[in-house]
Image (cartoon, rainbow, N blue to C red):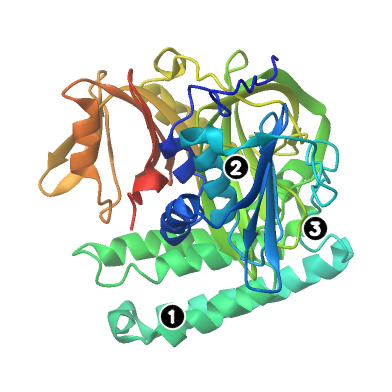
Amino acid sequence: MQTIATPPSALLPPTWSAEHIFSLAPTLTVAKSSQTTAASTRWRELSRDDVRIWGVYPYNLQSVIQTSVNLNTFATACSCTNRGRPCSHILALMLIALDQPERFTVGPAPDWHVDAATTAKDKEDMGQADTESDRLGQMQTGMVELETWLGDMIHQGLAELPNRPKSYWQRMIDRLTDARAHEVAQQLREISTIPNSNPDWPDHLLRQIGRLYLLTQGFRHIDQLPVVNRADLLAAVGWTPPLNPADRVADRWVVLGSSIRPMARQQLQQTWLFGCNSERFALHEQIIRHTDPVQFLLPGGATFATTLTFSHSAHPLHARLPLPTMITIDTPDLDKLGSSITEAHRRYRNAVSVNPWLRRFPMLLSQITPTLQFEQWEVHGNDGARLPLPPDFGMGWHLLAFSGGRPLTLIGEWDGTHLHPLTVYTADDWIDLRTLRAIR
């Protein structure tokens, strides 16, 4: 993999755009703030060498914020205390490098600079300091309480749910978070928005409750499950399954898209990757802590050559990406790598038949056309198949505009009921829908 050149006229590769940078923002507020920070004249010591850029931004009269980015590995560091990562200072520094490279002077890295290319630390899974039995005990206790809570909900009837206060749901969500069952807490958070969301909400709610109940029953018998099924059950609750050293895949991987989910006082970034040769999907997870000295960016459309190690699973998706790695923005022709809706759904059925706790399944769909049917947005394939988008999907007309009347390539997560779009790929552009905040 060639390193990224940094001639005086450009610091970021020509394939980069402001949209690539904004798509990395954890929130819309951070994206907007980065524009203001980039335009500020308060920056000091904007400098660079062959592979890094860095700068100093005054915080107040007594202190400053020190920010740096490695342009080979896209490892970043910032001394600010903002919890969202990447923060506005990191994004602002990249925006300056993109639009105003002349503001950087060439010089040696300062003493405070964190050499992000050599100080990468393999982030520990949350709770690794605890013993496995302690954490498993916490999860089992939380799942027993969830089973009781679900039983009470059904006993009392669904008709009262639209009148329930937010605290009714939040108490159970907090309890699951305390029990380290983060994925289940997120799932319940999404379920809490279903009552009265549409005329068919009771049917949709019952399906989601059924999935949660299946999880609670799995935990009742977790000690009797085979290794792969046990790993899948733990992953469904929020515990990254152990790695399988026998399942290692060397390939050129492309970043399809990512989402950021709250997890206790931290954030969990989940990024979908696709192997150009192996045609395997991989889910890479990073716990984002503002106290970590280095964070690594994985922008949509980026590619890198490395070996991923997959986790134990009946249908392996979770994988460990060795960081740092050399990254370029050199997106392959995803339209040729994508599949039809029929083929993608066949793969989903095969996956869920061996892993019934699978909640999200990646789909790389080619030759897709968005359509509006009876106030419901759908995507149609050239094979005649279709998939519904979420009822609260707010960018249907934008998708139609992106297509320009022609089929496009769409990356999304299928939850068994709706396709949640993440990224759109056309002949002219790569569009990360998180940049547009497409799903409210």
- Pointer 3 local density, CA inside 10 Å: few below 14, some 14–19, many at least 20: few
Which label number is shown at residue 223? 3
Q: Residue at x 43, y 38 (%)?
A: 18
Q: Nearer the viewer, residue 77 or 343?
A: 77
The residue indicated by pointer 2 is 355
Q: Position of residue 279 (x, y in %)?
A: 57, 19
Foreground mark, 3 or 2, reads 2
- Pointer 2 local density, CA inside 10 Å: few below 14, some 14–19, many at least 20: some
Residue 417 makes an appearance in the image: no
- What's the CA distance linking mark 3 and mark 1? 28 Å
Q: Classify mark 1: helix, strand or loop.
A: helix
- What's the CA distance linking mark 3 and mark 2? 17 Å
Answer above or below: position of 261 versus 334.
Answer: below
Q: Residue at x 64, y 70 (%)?
A: 264
The residue indicated by pointer 1 is 153
Q: Position of residue 275 (x, y in %)?
A: 60, 21
